[in-house]
Image: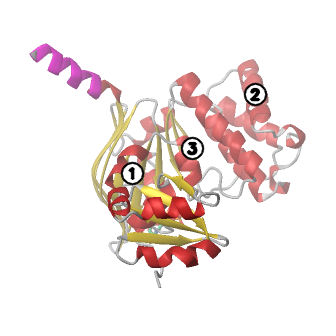
C-alpha cells in the first residue's frame, strides 16, 4: 500500500516538468504584472495561457524562459532551478517570443540554417531540419527572400520556425499565431501537435484565440491582473461554470422568446445574426424553457455546451446588457 502511494508520488514527481510557486513580478517596484502564480505542467502537455492585454502572459513566459528575474517565488523546470541557473533552461527550451528582432539581412534559409547550427546541429543535419521546417510551415517560396522584406505574418512564421529547429525538450510560444491567416494558423497547429505527439515535447503557449486554445491545449490557465483565476482541462473549467447549456437562436426569433427568460438565471451573448443564451440546464428544464424553445423553433436552434470563449468571458467579467 505504502509502496503504491510512494510510486504514485515518484511518478508525479517525474512527470511534472514545470512547477512555479508564488511566482511574482513587480516591475520597477510598482507594476504588479504577476502575482502568486502557482503552476504545474506535466510532461507532454500542451498548456495554454489566456487573458486580456496586459494580464501578465508575456511576463510569465519571460520568467519561465530565464529571460526575466522574478521579484519573488520559485521556478523549477525539469529539475532545473531557473532562478539560480537561467542559462541551463535555455539549453533545453525553444522560444517564440511575442516581440523580438530578426536578422533582416539574412535570407529565410540562412537565418534558419545559422540558428540550427547554433543549436548544435551538424551541417547535414541542420540542412535537413531547415528543409523540413520550411516545408511544414509552407515557406518554400520565401526561402531565398531577405527576412527584412517579409510581411508581418511571414516573420511570425520565421519566429515559430526558429523555436522548433532544435527539436527542443520544452517549447514556449508567446502568441505564435497572431497575425497569421487561417491556413497558416492551422499549419502552426499541426506543427505544435506533431512536436508533442512525435517528440513528447511539453508546450506552453499564449493566445488570444479561444478556438485555438480549445483545439490545441490539454489545459488552460486564465490570467487576469497578474493572477491565475482558473486553470485546468476544458472539462474541468466547464464544470466550474454556472451554466452548462448554450442555446443559439437567430436574433429575430430571440425577440419572440426573450420573455420566457425573465425568471431564469441566464447570460446572453449577442452576435450579428444570432444570440447565444447560456443557461443552467436544470433550471431551464424545470421552467420548461428548453422544451418550449425546441418545440417552437426547432429548425433554427442549436444546442451546445459552453465554449472556452464563454468560460473566458464569464471569468474575465464580460456582462451583456440583458435588456
Ligand atoms: N518591461 C516592462 N516594464 C514595466 N512594465 C512592464 C514591462 N513589460 C510589461 N509591463 C507591464 O506589465 C503588465 C503585464 O504585461 P505583459 O506584457 O506581461 O501582458 P500580456 O498579458 O502579455 O499582454 P498582451 O496580451 O497585450 O501581450 C502590463 O501592465 C504591462 O504594461
Ligand atoms: Mg503578451
Measured as percent of width and height from the top left, residue 45 is found at 45, 35
87 or 275: nearer the viewer: 275
**Is disc 1 placed on a helix, strand or loop?**
helix
**For residue 7: magenta?**
yes
Say whether residue 103 is left or right of residue 35.
Answer: right
Q: CA distance from mark 2 to mark 1?
A: 38 Å
The boundaries of the magenta stretch are 2-12
Measured as percent of width and height from the top left, residue 169 is found at 50, 29
Residue 258 circle label: none
Q: Quadrant of residue 115?
A: top right
Residue farthest bottom in this picture:
323
In the displayed structure, would residue 174 be above or below residue 144? Answer: below
Q: Which residue is mark 2?
A: 132
Measured as percent of width and height from the top left, residue 70 is found at 34, 56
**Is disc 2 placed on a helix, strand or loop?**
helix
Residue 238 circle label: 1
CA neighbours of label 2 inside 10 A, class few (<14), some (14 to 19), many (20+): some
Residue farthest front in this picture:
295
Q: Quadrant of residue 314?
A: bottom left
Q: Which residue is mark 3?
A: 215
**For residue 259: magenta?**
no
First-in-chain label (1 vs 3):
3
First-in-chain label (3 vs 2):
2
Whether residue 312 appears in this view of the structure is: no
In the displayed structure, would residue 46 be above or below residue 121? Answer: below
**Is disc 3 placed on a helix, strand or loop?**
helix
Q: Quadrant of residue 116?
A: top right
CA neighbours of label 3 inside 10 A, class few (<14), some (14 to 19), many (20+): few
Amino acid at each position: 500500500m505504502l509502496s503504491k502511494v510512494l510510486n504514485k508520488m515518484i511518478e508525479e514527481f517525474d512527470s511534472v516538468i514545470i512547477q512555479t510557486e508564488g511566482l511574482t513580478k513587480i516591475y520597477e517596484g510598482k507594476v504588479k504584472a504577476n502575482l502568486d502564480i502557482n503552476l504545474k505542467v506535466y510532461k507532454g502537455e500542451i498548456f495554454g495561457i489566456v487573458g486580456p492585454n496586459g494580464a501578465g502572459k508575456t511576463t510569465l513566459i519571460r520568467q519561465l524562459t530565464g529571460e526575466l528575474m522574478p521579484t519573488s517565488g520559485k521556478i523549477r523546470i525539469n529539475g532545473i532551478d531557473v532562478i539560480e541557473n537561467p542559462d541551463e533552461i535555455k539549453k533545453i527550451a525553444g522560444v517564440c517570443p511575442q516581440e523580438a528582432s530578426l536578422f533582416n539581412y539574412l535570407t529565410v534559409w540562412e537565418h534558419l540554417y545559422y540558428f540550427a547550427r547554433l543549436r548544435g546541429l551538424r551541417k547535414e543535419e541542420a540542412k535537413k531540419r531547415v528543409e523540413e521546417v520550411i516545408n511544414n510551415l509552407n515557406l518554400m517560396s520565401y526561402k531565398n527572400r531577405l527576412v527584412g522584406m517579409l510581411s508581418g505574418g511571414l516573420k511570425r512564421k520565421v519566429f515559430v520556425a526558429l523555436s522548433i529547429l532544435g527539436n527542443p525538450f520544452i517549447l514556449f510560444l508567446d502568441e505564435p499565431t497572431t497575425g497569421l491567416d487561417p491556413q497558416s494558423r492551422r499549419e502552426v497547429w499541426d506543427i505544435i501537435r506533431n512536436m508533442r505527439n512525435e517528440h513528447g515535447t511539453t508546450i506552453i503557449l499564449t493566445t488570444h484565440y479561444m478556438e485555438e486554445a480549445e483545439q490545441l491545449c490539454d489545459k488552460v490557465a486564465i490570467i487576469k491582473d497578474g493572477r491565475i483565476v482558473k486553470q485546468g482541462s476544458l472539462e474541468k473549467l466547464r464544470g466550474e461554470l454556472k451554466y452548462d447549456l448554450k442555446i443559439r437562436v437567430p436574433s429575430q426569433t430571440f425577440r419572440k422568446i426573450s420573455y420566457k427568460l425573465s425568471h431564469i438565471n441566464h447570460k446572453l451573448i449577442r452576435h450579428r445574426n444570432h444570440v447565444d443564451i447560456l443557461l443552467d440546464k436544470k433550471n431551464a428544464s424545470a421552467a420548461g424553457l428548453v422544451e418550449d424553445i425546441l418545440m417552437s423553433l426547432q429548425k433554427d436552434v442549436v444546442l451546445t455546451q459552453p465554449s472556452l470563449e464563454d468560460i473566458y468571458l464569464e471569468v474575465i467579467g464580460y456582462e451583456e446588457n440583458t435588456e
